[in-house]
Image (spheres, rainbow, N blue to C red):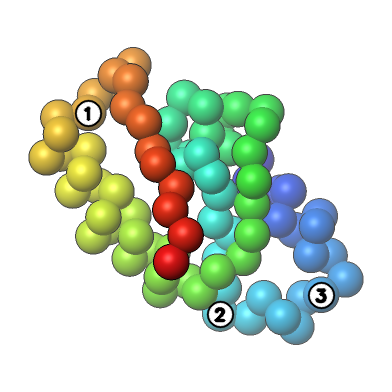
Amino acid sequence: MSTRTCKWGWRNRQAEIVGKSCDEFPFASTKEGALSGTHYSVDYISHPDNQGFGFYVLGPFYQKERIIENDNFYVQVVED
């Protein structure tokens, strides 16, 4: 769902998205996420950054905190 939304929103700016991938919030892996939810935000970011976050941050967070299907958790967004 998020990829379709990204493509539609950036349909006239294809040159700007080379080397980037669609990122979404809430995370697609969550129940509220762009994979199945209806209220989410998307943008294109660096492909390595997008893949790296999932592999090095989000995946290990799920494992460390023992997050499994239907578990609740909160994400606090902070600005640098």
Residue nearest the viewer, comparing 71 with 47: 71
Which tag, 3 or 2, sits closer to the chain's start? 3
Residue at label 3? 13
Asked whether, in this view, residue 27 is left or right of residue 60, the answer is right
- Residue type pointed to by label 3: Arg
Which tag, 1 or 2, sits closer to the chain's start? 2
Q: Please tell me whether mark 1 sits on a helix, a strand or a loop.
A: loop
Is 17 rendered above or below residue 33? below
- Residue type pointed to by label 2: Gly
Q: Residue 49: percent from the left, percent from the top?
A: 41, 70
Q: Quadrant of residue 62?
A: top left
Residue at label 1? 67
Which tag, 3 or 1, sits closer to the chain's start? 3
Residue nearest the viewer, comparing 64 with 4: 64
Report the residue at 57% width, 28% height from top: 36
Q: Are marks 3 and 1 in contact (CB under 8 Å)?
A: no
Report the residue at 63% width, 80% height from top: 18
Q: Please tell me whether mark 3 sits on a helix, a strand or a loop.
A: loop
Which of discs 1 and 2 lies nearer the camera? The answer is 1
- Residue type pointed to by label 1: Ile
Classify 10 Å Cα crowding around label 1: few (below 14), some (14-19), many (20 and above).
some
Report the residue at 81% width, 75% height from top: 13
Q: Which mark is residue 5?
A: none
Residue at label 2? 19
Which of discs 3 and 1 lies nearer the camera? The answer is 1
Q: Residue 28: percent from the left, percent from the top?
A: 48, 40
Q: Please tell me whether mark 2 sits on a helix, a strand or a loop.
A: loop
Report the residue at 25% width, 47% height from top: 59
Q: CA distance from mark 3 to mark 2?
A: 13 Å
